Image (cartoon, rainbow, N blue to C red):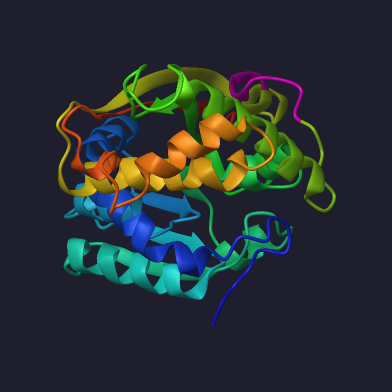
């Protein structure tokens, strides 16, 4: 059954294969982020918008032997099922794994989760929600005093192509990324009850009532030549850029991109040994005040 969020109209269940691939690609970095976030005293974690379960699985593995719990939250039933099953395999009964089917944009989130926890984690979730500041307040409400909210959001635009790919004019990827940015702005405006967030994420966490806000960034760096999940991520990125390129870039740029994406053509990007995958993501963490 296809499942759409009422607010962003994306069929997240249909994204399962891509999300699995993304988890495989970024597993080392996800484990490092989880290790950096968990304090020795942390026992109970909520993973919001769990996707295919990469982060939930890393939390389950890290909490093994502590008597802790991981609450896996997603509004897409197939994703929730996949993420929960993966986390249970990683936990091997050493950690309680709970599944909660609800939307982070729903005011009933706290009731659905049903407990206050040490750490709430939401990776690449909040920017999809209609009122992002209200969402941060909602997520902060899941914390016990002294607990922390960690959100992961995009730090820099991903890059996969050389500046000059030898097809069309140089600088193709930057122009495609600008077109995508323009499409994202439209998508935000089209979300029902969309509210602007005219501040950075760290300021937004403070505005949501959190203190001791800190931020760090990390790279997902897969140099050329890429193979496996990194190669598939390159192809998916270009397909994704193609979706928003129509009517936003020149006919020459569209033609160049189509040549790069044609598996039967001589310029197919999947046969190149000089494409790479480079992304910078940023973690923002705030603490719920005691008392």
Question: Does the stretch in magenta take in 198?
Answer: yes
Q: Position of residue 269 (x, y in %)?
A: 28, 39
Query: In the rendered view, would you say 35 is above or below 280?
Result: below
Query: In the rendered view, would you say 2 is above or below 120?
Result: below
Q: 148 left or right of 28? A: right
Q: Quadrant of residue 182?
A: top right
Q: Identify the residue at horizontal 55%, vertical 63% (top origin).
A: 113
Q: Identify the residue at horizontal 51%, vertical 40% (top origin).
A: 241
Q: Position of residue 23 (x, y in %)?
A: 29, 50
Q: 229 left or right of 22? A: left
Closest to the observer, 8 or 178: 178
Q: Quadrant of residue 126?
A: top right
Locate the N terminus by quadrant. Answer: bottom right
- Looking at the image, which residue sits at the far bottom? 1
Q: Identify the residue at horizontal 47%, vertical 24% (top origin).
A: 172
Q: Which residues are magenta?
A: 197-203
Closest to the observer, 265 or 148: 265
Locate the C terminus by quadrant. Answer: top right
Q: Position of residue 225 (x, y in %)?
A: 14, 31
Q: 257 left or right of 227? A: right
Query: In the rendered view, would you say 88 is above or below 274?
Result: below
Q: Identify the residue at horizontal 65%, vertical 60% (top origin).
A: 109
Question: Does the stretch in magenta take in 82?
Answer: no
Closest to the observer, 167 or 27: 167
């Amino acid at each position: 059954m296809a499942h759409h969020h009422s607010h962003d109209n994306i069929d997240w269940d249909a994204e399962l294969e891509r999300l699995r691939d993304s988890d495989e690609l970024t597993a080392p970095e996800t484990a490092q982020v989880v290790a950096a976030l968990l304090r020795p005293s942390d026992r109970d974690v909520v993973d919001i918008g769990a996707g295919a379960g990469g982060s939930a699985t890393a939390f389950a593995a890290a909490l093994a032997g502590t008597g802790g719990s991981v609450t896996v939250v997603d509004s897409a039933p197939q994703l929730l099922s996949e993420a929960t099953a993966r986390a249970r395999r990683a936990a091997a009964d050493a950690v309680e794994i709970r599944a909660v089917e609800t939307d982070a944009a729903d005011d009933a989130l706290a009731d659905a989760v049903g407990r206050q926890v040490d750490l709430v984690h939401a990776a690449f979730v909040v920017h999809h929600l209609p009122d992002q500041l209200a969402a941060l307040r909602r997520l902060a409400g899941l914390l016990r005093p002294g607990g922390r909210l960690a959100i992961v959001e995009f730090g820099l635009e991903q890059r996969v192509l050389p500046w000059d790919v030898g097809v069309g004019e140089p600088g193709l990827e930057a122009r495609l990324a600008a077109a995508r940015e323009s499409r994202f702005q439209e998508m935000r405006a089209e979300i029902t009850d969309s509210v602007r967030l005219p501040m950075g994420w760290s300021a937004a966490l403070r505005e949501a009532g959190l203190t001791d806000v800190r931020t760090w960034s990390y790279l997902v760096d897969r140099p050329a030549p890429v193979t496996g999940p990194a190669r598939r991520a390159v192809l998916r990125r270009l397909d994704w850029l193609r979706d928003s390129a129509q009517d936003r870039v020149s006919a020459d740029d569209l033609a160049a991109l189509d040549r790069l994406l044609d598996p039967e053509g001589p310029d197919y990007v999947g046969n190149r040994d000089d494409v790479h995958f480079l992304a910078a993501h940023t973690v923002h963490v705030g603490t719920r005040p005691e008392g």
